[in-house]
Image: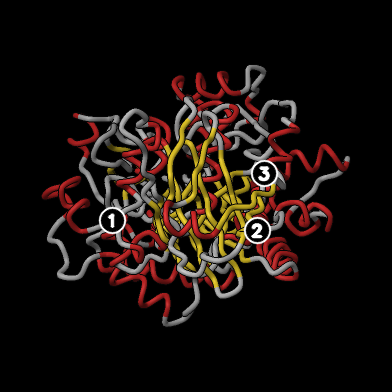
Amino acid sequence: MTVIHEINTLVWLTELSGRYGRPVTLGDVPGEVWDSVAPPGVDTVWLMGVWERSPAGLEIALRDEGLRASFREALPDVTDADIAGSPYCVHDYVVDASLGGPDGLAAARSQLAARGLRLILDHVPNHVAPDHPWLTSGPDRLVRGTADDLARAPADFIEAGGKVYARGRDPYFPPWPDVVQLNAFSDELREATVDTLVSIGDQADGVRCDMAMLPMNDIFGKTWGDRAGTAPAEDFWPYVIPRVRARHPDLLFVAEAYWDLEGALQQQGFDHCYDKRLYDRLLHESADSVRTHLGADLAHQRGLVRFLENHDEPRAAATLPGDRGRAAAVAVATLPGATLWHEGQFEGRRVRPPVFLRRRPQEPVDEPLRAFYGRLLPAAAAVRRGDWRPLTPTGWPDNDTHRDLLAWTWTHADARHLVVVNDSERPAQARLPLPWDDLRGRVCRATDLLNGAVYDRDGGELADRGLFVSLEGWGCHVLKW
Protein backbone atom coordinates (compact mmCIF):
# COMPACT_ATOMS: atom_id res chain seq x y z
CA MET A 1 0.00 0.00 0.00
CA THR A 2 1.17 3.51 -0.79
CA VAL A 3 2.95 5.40 2.02
CA ILE A 4 3.92 8.94 1.02
CA HIS A 5 6.46 11.24 2.65
CA GLU A 6 5.85 14.88 1.70
CA ILE A 7 8.90 17.14 1.62
CA ASN A 8 8.85 20.93 1.23
CA THR A 9 11.61 20.88 -1.37
CA LEU A 10 12.75 24.50 -1.12
CA VAL A 11 12.94 24.57 2.69
CA TRP A 12 14.61 21.15 2.74
CA LEU A 13 17.32 22.16 0.27
CA THR A 14 17.86 25.48 2.10
CA GLU A 15 18.49 23.61 5.34
CA LEU A 16 20.73 21.06 3.64
CA SER A 17 22.78 23.88 2.15
CA GLY A 18 23.29 25.31 5.62
CA ARG A 19 24.17 21.92 7.07
CA TYR A 20 26.75 21.06 4.40
CA GLY A 21 28.14 24.57 3.96
CA ARG A 22 27.54 24.64 0.22
CA PRO A 23 24.59 25.09 -2.15
CA VAL A 24 22.70 21.77 -2.28
CA THR A 25 20.33 21.13 -5.19
CA LEU A 26 18.29 18.09 -6.13
CA GLY A 27 21.16 16.87 -8.26
CA ASP A 28 23.71 16.64 -5.46
CA VAL A 29 21.82 15.72 -2.29
CA PRO A 30 24.14 13.40 -0.32
CA GLY A 31 23.24 9.73 -0.33
CA GLU A 32 22.77 9.55 3.44
CA VAL A 33 20.12 12.26 3.17
CA TRP A 34 18.18 10.27 0.58
CA ASP A 35 18.38 7.32 2.96
CA SER A 36 16.82 9.42 5.71
CA VAL A 37 13.84 10.75 3.72
CA ALA A 38 12.38 7.27 3.34
CA PRO A 39 12.44 5.40 6.64
CA PRO A 40 11.26 1.78 6.63
CA GLY A 41 7.61 1.67 5.60
CA VAL A 42 7.73 4.65 3.20
CA ASP A 43 7.61 3.81 -0.51
CA THR A 44 6.84 7.17 -2.15
CA VAL A 45 8.39 10.63 -1.80
CA TRP A 46 6.44 13.76 -2.73
CA LEU A 47 8.81 16.59 -3.57
CA MET A 48 6.40 19.46 -3.06
CA GLY A 49 7.04 22.68 -4.97
CA VAL A 50 9.68 21.91 -7.61
CA TRP A 51 8.23 23.95 -10.51
CA GLU A 52 9.27 27.48 -11.47
CA ARG A 53 7.70 30.01 -9.10
CA SER A 54 6.29 33.16 -10.60
CA PRO A 55 8.19 36.47 -10.32
CA ALA A 56 4.86 38.27 -10.87
CA GLY A 57 3.24 36.20 -8.13
CA LEU A 58 6.13 36.99 -5.80
CA GLU A 59 5.65 40.73 -6.34
CA ILE A 60 1.96 40.38 -5.49
CA ALA A 61 2.78 38.37 -2.36
CA LEU A 62 5.30 40.94 -1.19
CA ARG A 63 2.62 43.64 -1.36
CA ASP A 64 -0.05 41.57 0.43
CA GLU A 65 -0.17 42.54 4.11
CA GLY A 66 -2.32 39.57 5.03
CA LEU A 67 0.25 37.18 3.61
CA ARG A 68 3.12 39.06 5.21
CA ALA A 69 1.40 38.80 8.59
CA SER A 70 1.18 35.03 8.17
CA PHE A 71 4.89 34.94 7.28
CA ARG A 72 5.79 36.86 10.46
CA GLU A 73 3.62 34.63 12.59
CA ALA A 74 5.47 31.51 11.41
CA LEU A 75 8.92 33.12 11.15
CA PRO A 76 9.19 36.24 13.35
CA ASP A 77 12.54 37.31 11.86
CA VAL A 78 11.37 36.86 8.26
CA THR A 79 12.97 39.04 5.59
CA ASP A 80 12.09 39.60 1.96
CA ALA A 81 14.91 37.22 1.03
CA ASP A 82 13.02 34.44 2.82
CA ILE A 83 9.94 34.91 0.63
CA ALA A 84 10.14 32.89 -2.59
CA GLY A 85 6.55 33.06 -3.82
CA SER A 86 4.00 30.28 -3.85
CA PRO A 87 4.81 26.90 -5.41
CA TYR A 88 1.13 26.82 -6.41
CA CYS A 89 1.57 30.00 -8.43
CA VAL A 90 3.29 28.14 -11.26
CA HIS A 91 5.25 30.20 -13.76
CA ASP A 92 5.91 27.11 -15.88
CA TYR A 93 6.01 23.35 -15.39
CA VAL A 94 9.81 23.29 -15.54
CA VAL A 95 11.91 22.40 -12.48
CA ASP A 96 13.20 25.63 -10.98
CA ALA A 97 16.85 26.22 -11.82
CA SER A 98 17.58 27.16 -8.20
CA LEU A 99 16.52 23.66 -7.18
CA GLY A 100 18.69 21.95 -9.78
CA GLY A 101 16.54 22.17 -12.91
CA PRO A 102 15.31 19.13 -14.88
CA ASP A 103 18.68 17.39 -14.67
CA GLY A 104 18.69 17.76 -10.90
CA LEU A 105 15.22 16.26 -10.66
CA ALA A 106 16.24 13.36 -12.89
CA ALA A 107 19.19 12.68 -10.59
CA ALA A 108 16.90 12.81 -7.55
CA ARG A 109 14.46 10.40 -9.16
CA SER A 110 17.32 8.03 -9.90
CA GLN A 111 18.46 8.18 -6.27
CA LEU A 112 14.94 7.42 -5.08
CA ALA A 113 14.48 4.59 -7.56
CA ALA A 114 17.74 3.01 -6.41
CA ARG A 115 16.13 2.80 -2.97
CA GLY A 116 12.88 1.33 -4.31
CA LEU A 117 10.99 4.62 -3.95
CA ARG A 118 8.54 6.36 -6.25
CA LEU A 119 8.49 10.11 -6.88
CA ILE A 120 5.36 12.29 -6.83
CA LEU A 121 5.18 15.87 -8.10
CA ASP A 122 2.50 18.57 -8.04
CA HIS A 123 0.01 19.64 -10.67
CA VAL A 124 -2.31 22.64 -10.25
CA PRO A 125 -5.31 22.17 -12.57
CA ASN A 126 -7.30 25.22 -11.47
CA HIS A 127 -4.96 28.16 -12.03
CA VAL A 128 -1.58 29.44 -13.20
CA ALA A 129 0.60 32.46 -12.51
CA PRO A 130 -0.17 35.80 -14.18
CA ASP A 131 3.09 35.46 -16.13
CA HIS A 132 2.57 31.84 -17.21
CA PRO A 133 3.20 31.37 -20.98
CA TRP A 134 -0.42 30.40 -21.58
CA LEU A 135 -1.57 33.98 -21.03
CA THR A 136 0.03 34.87 -24.35
CA SER A 137 0.15 31.53 -26.18
CA GLY A 138 -3.28 30.23 -25.16
CA PRO A 139 -5.56 32.89 -23.65
CA ASP A 140 -8.63 30.80 -24.49
CA ARG A 141 -7.48 28.37 -21.82
CA LEU A 142 -8.31 30.97 -19.16
CA VAL A 143 -11.42 32.66 -17.81
CA ARG A 144 -11.50 36.09 -19.39
CA GLY A 145 -12.85 39.38 -18.10
CA THR A 146 -13.37 42.90 -19.38
CA ALA A 147 -12.07 46.32 -18.49
CA ASP A 148 -15.43 46.98 -16.83
CA ASP A 149 -15.00 43.83 -14.71
CA LEU A 150 -11.57 45.02 -13.61
CA ALA A 151 -12.84 48.49 -12.74
CA ARG A 152 -15.85 47.11 -10.85
CA ALA A 153 -14.07 44.31 -8.95
CA PRO A 154 -10.29 44.75 -8.99
CA ALA A 155 -9.86 42.03 -6.33
CA ASP A 156 -11.56 39.52 -8.64
CA PHE A 157 -9.76 40.31 -11.90
CA ILE A 158 -6.24 41.04 -13.04
CA GLU A 159 -4.72 42.64 -16.13
CA ALA A 160 -1.82 40.86 -17.79
CA GLY A 161 -0.39 41.40 -21.26
CA GLY A 162 -3.08 43.91 -22.11
CA LYS A 163 -5.91 41.43 -21.38
CA VAL A 164 -8.15 41.01 -18.35
CA TYR A 165 -8.48 37.64 -16.64
CA ALA A 166 -10.34 36.33 -13.62
CA ARG A 167 -8.23 35.58 -10.59
CA GLY A 168 -8.21 31.95 -9.49
CA ARG A 169 -10.65 30.93 -6.78
CA ASP A 170 -12.80 28.23 -5.27
CA PRO A 171 -16.52 28.82 -4.70
CA TYR A 172 -16.32 29.42 -0.95
CA PHE A 173 -13.54 31.98 -0.54
CA PRO A 174 -12.37 35.22 -2.12
CA PRO A 175 -10.03 34.87 -5.10
CA TRP A 176 -6.35 34.15 -4.57
CA PRO A 177 -4.52 37.39 -5.40
CA ASP A 178 -1.55 35.88 -7.23
CA VAL A 179 -3.08 33.46 -9.77
CA VAL A 180 -5.23 33.44 -12.91
CA GLN A 181 -8.20 31.13 -13.40
CA LEU A 182 -8.06 28.33 -15.97
CA ASN A 183 -11.25 27.47 -17.85
CA ALA A 184 -12.01 23.79 -17.23
CA PHE A 185 -14.68 23.89 -19.97
CA SER A 186 -12.13 24.91 -22.61
CA ASP A 187 -11.19 22.16 -25.08
CA GLU A 188 -7.83 23.83 -25.53
CA LEU A 189 -7.20 23.81 -21.77
CA ARG A 190 -8.09 20.13 -21.51
CA GLU A 191 -5.65 19.23 -24.27
CA ALA A 192 -2.95 21.37 -22.68
CA THR A 193 -3.58 19.70 -19.30
CA VAL A 194 -3.05 16.30 -20.90
CA ASP A 195 0.23 17.49 -22.40
CA THR A 196 1.34 18.94 -19.04
CA LEU A 197 0.56 15.75 -17.16
CA VAL A 198 2.27 13.60 -19.77
CA SER A 199 5.36 15.79 -19.29
CA ILE A 200 5.12 15.34 -15.52
CA GLY A 201 4.78 11.61 -16.11
CA ASP A 202 8.05 11.71 -18.05
CA GLN A 203 9.74 13.03 -14.90
CA ALA A 204 7.94 11.27 -12.03
CA ASP A 205 5.97 8.20 -11.00
CA GLY A 206 2.92 10.04 -9.73
CA VAL A 207 1.16 13.37 -9.53
CA ARG A 208 -0.66 15.09 -6.69
CA CYS A 209 -3.41 17.26 -8.18
CA ASP A 210 -4.09 20.40 -6.15
CA MET A 211 -7.78 21.08 -5.34
CA ALA A 212 -8.75 18.39 -7.82
CA MET A 213 -12.49 18.87 -7.40
CA LEU A 214 -12.49 22.43 -8.77
CA PRO A 215 -12.40 21.50 -12.51
CA MET A 216 -15.28 19.01 -12.18
CA ASN A 217 -18.13 20.10 -14.44
CA ASP A 218 -20.70 20.73 -11.73
CA ILE A 219 -18.28 22.50 -9.36
CA PHE A 220 -16.77 24.64 -12.10
CA GLY A 221 -20.16 25.55 -13.51
CA LYS A 222 -21.48 26.62 -10.11
CA THR A 223 -18.35 28.66 -9.43
CA TRP A 224 -18.24 30.55 -12.72
CA GLY A 225 -21.79 30.49 -14.12
CA ASP A 226 -22.23 32.02 -17.57
CA ARG A 227 -18.64 33.19 -17.63
CA ALA A 228 -17.52 29.56 -17.91
CA GLY A 229 -19.46 28.89 -21.09
CA THR A 230 -21.22 25.62 -21.90
CA ALA A 231 -20.15 22.55 -19.99
CA PRO A 232 -18.71 19.80 -22.20
CA ALA A 233 -20.59 16.50 -22.27
CA GLU A 234 -17.59 14.75 -20.71
CA ASP A 235 -16.31 15.73 -17.29
CA PHE A 236 -12.78 17.13 -16.89
CA TRP A 237 -10.91 14.22 -15.32
CA PRO A 238 -12.55 11.42 -17.36
CA TYR A 239 -11.29 13.32 -20.39
CA VAL A 240 -7.79 13.98 -19.04
CA ILE A 241 -6.74 10.90 -17.06
CA PRO A 242 -7.26 8.17 -19.71
CA ARG A 243 -5.33 10.22 -22.27
CA VAL A 244 -2.43 10.63 -19.84
CA ARG A 245 -2.50 6.95 -18.94
CA ALA A 246 -2.30 6.05 -22.62
CA ARG A 247 1.29 7.34 -22.35
CA HIS A 248 1.97 6.53 -18.69
CA PRO A 249 -0.21 3.55 -17.69
CA ASP A 250 1.23 3.29 -14.18
CA LEU A 251 1.24 7.00 -13.27
CA LEU A 252 -0.21 7.36 -9.76
CA PHE A 253 -2.96 10.00 -9.55
CA VAL A 254 -3.53 11.51 -6.09
CA ALA A 255 -6.25 14.11 -5.56
CA GLU A 256 -6.38 16.81 -2.95
CA ALA A 257 -10.13 16.61 -2.40
CA TYR A 258 -12.69 18.15 -0.08
CA TRP A 259 -16.47 18.54 0.25
CA ASP A 260 -17.06 14.74 0.36
CA LEU A 261 -16.16 14.43 -3.33
CA GLU A 262 -13.57 11.70 -2.80
CA GLY A 263 -15.84 8.96 -4.13
CA ALA A 264 -16.73 10.94 -7.24
CA LEU A 265 -13.07 11.63 -7.99
CA GLN A 266 -12.21 7.96 -7.51
CA GLN A 267 -14.90 7.13 -10.04
CA GLN A 268 -13.35 9.68 -12.41
CA GLY A 269 -9.98 7.96 -12.38
CA PHE A 270 -7.97 8.95 -9.30
CA ASP A 271 -6.08 6.23 -7.45
CA HIS A 272 -6.20 8.04 -4.10
CA CYS A 273 -8.06 11.05 -2.70
CA TYR A 274 -7.51 12.95 0.53
CA ASP A 275 -9.59 11.64 3.45
CA LYS A 276 -10.23 15.04 5.00
CA ARG A 277 -13.36 13.72 6.69
CA LEU A 278 -11.37 11.22 8.77
CA TYR A 279 -8.90 13.97 9.70
CA ASP A 280 -11.76 16.16 10.94
CA ARG A 281 -13.36 13.30 12.87
CA LEU A 282 -10.11 12.42 14.63
CA LEU A 283 -9.61 16.04 15.63
CA HIS A 284 -13.14 17.06 16.55
CA GLU A 285 -15.51 14.10 16.86
CA SER A 286 -16.01 10.87 18.80
CA ALA A 287 -14.84 7.32 18.25
CA ASP A 288 -18.39 6.44 17.18
CA SER A 289 -18.07 9.00 14.39
CA VAL A 290 -14.74 7.52 13.27
CA ARG A 291 -16.21 4.01 13.42
CA THR A 292 -19.12 5.05 11.20
CA HIS A 293 -16.64 6.56 8.73
CA LEU A 294 -14.71 3.30 8.61
CA GLY A 295 -17.86 1.41 7.72
CA ALA A 296 -17.66 2.67 4.14
CA ASP A 297 -17.13 0.29 1.24
CA LEU A 298 -13.65 -1.25 1.36
CA ALA A 299 -12.87 -0.42 -2.27
CA HIS A 300 -13.62 3.23 -1.49
CA GLN A 301 -11.40 3.15 1.60
CA ARG A 302 -8.49 1.70 -0.36
CA GLY A 303 -8.69 4.80 -2.54
CA LEU A 304 -8.31 7.26 0.36
CA VAL A 305 -5.24 9.09 1.70
CA ARG A 306 -5.12 9.11 5.51
CA PHE A 307 -3.14 11.91 7.16
CA LEU A 308 -2.75 13.98 10.33
CA GLU A 309 -0.99 16.92 8.71
CA ASN A 310 0.31 18.23 5.40
CA HIS A 311 1.49 21.62 4.15
CA ASP A 312 -2.11 22.95 4.24
CA GLU A 313 -3.00 21.76 7.76
CA PRO A 314 -1.57 22.69 11.16
CA ARG A 315 1.19 20.54 12.52
CA ALA A 316 -0.06 17.40 14.27
CA ALA A 317 2.18 18.05 17.28
CA ALA A 318 0.24 21.29 17.81
CA THR A 319 -3.29 20.00 17.18
CA LEU A 320 -2.88 16.45 18.56
CA PRO A 321 -0.19 16.66 21.23
CA GLY A 322 1.26 13.82 23.24
CA ASP A 323 -0.47 10.46 23.51
CA ARG A 324 -3.49 11.71 21.59
CA GLY A 325 -1.32 12.29 18.55
CA ARG A 326 0.27 8.87 18.92
CA ALA A 327 -3.15 7.21 19.03
CA ALA A 328 -4.27 9.05 15.91
CA ALA A 329 -1.02 8.14 14.16
CA VAL A 330 -1.54 4.44 14.91
CA ALA A 331 -5.01 4.71 13.41
CA VAL A 332 -4.07 6.42 10.15
CA ALA A 333 -0.95 4.23 9.74
CA THR A 334 -2.83 0.92 9.97
CA LEU A 335 -6.00 1.59 7.97
CA PRO A 336 -6.54 0.53 4.36
CA GLY A 337 -5.63 3.08 1.71
CA ALA A 338 -2.62 5.35 1.32
CA THR A 339 -0.88 7.08 4.22
CA LEU A 340 0.61 10.57 4.00
CA TRP A 341 3.36 11.71 6.38
CA HIS A 342 4.74 15.24 6.35
CA GLU A 343 8.44 16.02 6.75
CA GLY A 344 8.99 17.22 10.32
CA GLN A 345 5.99 15.31 11.66
CA PHE A 346 8.19 12.53 13.03
CA GLU A 347 10.33 15.06 14.91
CA GLY A 348 7.36 16.88 16.46
CA ARG A 349 7.61 20.19 14.61
CA ARG A 350 4.82 22.52 15.72
CA VAL A 351 5.16 25.44 13.28
CA ARG A 352 3.67 25.10 9.81
CA PRO A 353 5.58 27.50 7.55
CA PRO A 354 3.59 29.10 4.72
CA VAL A 355 4.59 27.53 1.41
CA PHE A 356 5.85 30.95 0.22
CA LEU A 357 8.88 30.74 2.53
CA ARG A 358 12.29 29.21 1.85
CA ARG A 359 13.17 29.13 5.57
CA ARG A 360 11.42 27.94 8.71
CA PRO A 361 12.20 28.43 12.40
CA GLN A 362 14.52 26.10 14.22
CA GLU A 363 12.66 23.75 16.59
CA PRO A 364 13.91 21.13 19.05
CA VAL A 365 13.47 17.50 18.09
CA ASP A 366 10.98 15.53 20.18
CA GLU A 367 13.18 12.45 20.56
CA PRO A 368 10.53 10.21 22.20
CA LEU A 369 8.12 11.04 19.37
CA ARG A 370 10.78 10.29 16.75
CA ALA A 371 11.45 6.96 18.46
CA PHE A 372 7.71 6.21 18.46
CA TYR A 373 7.45 6.80 14.72
CA GLY A 374 10.58 4.72 14.25
CA ARG A 375 8.61 1.81 15.69
CA LEU A 376 5.24 2.63 14.12
CA LEU A 377 6.23 2.87 10.45
CA PRO A 378 7.80 -0.60 10.14
CA ALA A 379 5.02 -2.04 12.30
CA ALA A 380 2.38 -0.57 9.99
CA ALA A 381 4.20 -1.97 6.95
CA ALA A 382 4.09 -5.43 8.52
CA VAL A 383 0.44 -5.10 9.52
CA ARG A 384 -1.20 -3.83 6.33
CA ARG A 385 -1.29 -7.05 4.34
CA GLY A 386 -4.14 -9.33 3.39
CA ASP A 387 -7.76 -8.83 4.43
CA TRP A 388 -8.81 -5.91 6.63
CA ARG A 389 -11.85 -6.18 8.87
CA PRO A 390 -13.22 -3.61 11.32
CA LEU A 391 -14.32 -4.95 14.71
CA THR A 392 -17.21 -3.81 16.89
CA PRO A 393 -16.18 -3.68 20.57
CA THR A 394 -18.75 -4.87 23.09
CA GLY A 395 -19.13 -3.75 26.69
CA TRP A 396 -21.24 -4.15 29.78
CA PRO A 397 -24.41 -2.45 31.08
CA ASP A 398 -22.47 -0.51 33.70
CA ASN A 399 -19.48 0.32 31.46
CA ASP A 400 -19.93 2.03 28.11
CA THR A 401 -16.26 2.85 27.59
CA HIS A 402 -16.10 0.22 24.83
CA ARG A 403 -17.58 2.94 22.61
CA ASP A 404 -14.25 4.79 22.80
CA LEU A 405 -12.26 1.93 21.28
CA LEU A 406 -11.48 1.55 17.58
CA ALA A 407 -10.35 -1.88 16.45
CA TRP A 408 -9.60 -3.82 13.27
CA THR A 409 -7.75 -6.89 12.10
CA TRP A 410 -5.49 -7.67 9.18
CA THR A 411 -5.32 -11.33 8.14
CA HIS A 412 -2.68 -12.64 5.76
CA ALA A 413 -1.62 -16.17 4.89
CA ASP A 414 1.42 -15.94 7.15
CA ALA A 415 0.39 -13.29 9.70
CA ARG A 416 -2.48 -12.02 11.80
CA HIS A 417 -2.61 -8.59 13.37
CA LEU A 418 -5.00 -6.72 15.63
CA VAL A 419 -4.99 -2.94 16.08
CA VAL A 420 -6.82 -1.33 19.01
CA VAL A 421 -6.89 2.43 19.65
CA ASN A 422 -8.50 4.20 22.58
CA ASP A 423 -9.82 7.35 20.90
CA SER A 424 -10.51 9.14 24.18
CA GLU A 425 -8.75 10.52 27.23
CA ARG A 426 -10.46 8.12 29.68
CA PRO A 427 -9.58 4.46 30.32
CA ALA A 428 -11.64 2.03 28.23
CA GLN A 429 -12.43 -1.69 28.37
CA ALA A 430 -14.13 -4.00 25.89
CA ARG A 431 -14.41 -7.46 24.46
CA LEU A 432 -13.32 -7.77 20.84
CA PRO A 433 -14.76 -10.58 18.71
CA LEU A 434 -11.88 -11.95 16.66
CA PRO A 435 -12.56 -13.21 13.10
CA TRP A 436 -10.29 -16.26 13.32
CA ASP A 437 -12.01 -19.66 13.71
CA ASP A 438 -9.03 -21.85 14.66
CA LEU A 439 -8.24 -20.46 18.11
CA ARG A 440 -9.62 -23.25 20.28
CA GLY A 441 -7.44 -25.82 21.92
CA ARG A 442 -4.27 -23.78 22.23
CA VAL A 443 -2.63 -20.89 23.96
CA CYS A 444 -2.54 -17.87 21.66
CA ARG A 445 0.39 -15.49 22.02
CA ALA A 446 0.25 -11.85 20.93
CA THR A 447 3.23 -9.50 20.71
CA ASP A 448 2.76 -5.74 20.68
CA LEU A 449 4.87 -4.34 17.86
CA LEU A 450 5.00 -0.90 19.49
CA ASN A 451 6.55 -1.90 22.82
CA GLY A 452 7.42 -5.59 22.67
CA ALA A 453 4.93 -6.63 25.36
CA VAL A 454 3.81 -10.28 25.13
CA TYR A 455 0.34 -11.60 26.04
CA ASP A 456 -0.72 -15.25 26.30
CA ARG A 457 -4.45 -15.95 26.09
CA ASP A 458 -6.58 -19.09 26.06
CA GLY A 459 -7.84 -19.75 22.55
CA GLY A 460 -11.17 -21.11 23.78
CA GLU A 461 -11.93 -17.91 25.68
CA LEU A 462 -10.95 -15.83 22.65
CA ALA A 463 -13.30 -17.86 20.45
CA ASP A 464 -16.22 -17.81 22.89
CA ARG A 465 -16.04 -14.37 24.50
CA GLY A 466 -13.57 -12.41 22.44
CA LEU A 467 -10.38 -10.70 23.58
CA PHE A 468 -10.63 -8.60 26.73
CA VAL A 469 -8.85 -5.28 26.22
CA SER A 470 -8.19 -2.53 28.74
CA LEU A 471 -6.39 0.62 27.63
CA GLU A 472 -5.54 3.89 29.32
CA GLY A 473 -6.65 7.13 27.68
CA TRP A 474 -5.21 7.38 24.15
CA GLY A 475 -3.62 3.94 24.60
CA CYS A 476 -2.93 1.59 21.67
CA HIS A 477 -2.10 -1.98 20.78
CA VAL A 478 -0.62 -3.21 17.50
CA LEU A 479 -0.63 -6.95 18.14
CA LYS A 480 0.90 -9.69 16.06
CA TRP A 481 -0.71 -13.08 16.78
Q: Front-most of 283 and 118? A: 283
Which percent across, then down, holds residue 249?
Answer: 47, 80
Q: Which residue is mark 1?
A: 215
Mark 3: amino acid: Tyr
Q: CA distance from mark 3 to mark 1?
A: 37 Å
Q: Residues within 10 Å of mark 1 (few under 14, many from 20)?
A: many
Which percent across, then down, holds residue 196?
Answer: 45, 66
Q: Quadrant of residue 404?
A: top left
Seen at 57% across and 50% down, the residue is 48
- N-terminal of the pair, mark 1 or mark 2, is 2
Q: CA distance from mark 2 to mark 3?
A: 10 Å
Q: CA distance from mark 1 to mark 2?
A: 33 Å
Q: Residues within 10 Å of mark 3 (few under 14, many from 20)?
A: many
Which numbered tag is attached to residue 373? 3
Mark 3 or 1: the one toward you: 3
Left or right? Give the position of 410 relative to 47: left
Q: Which residue is mark 2?
A: 41
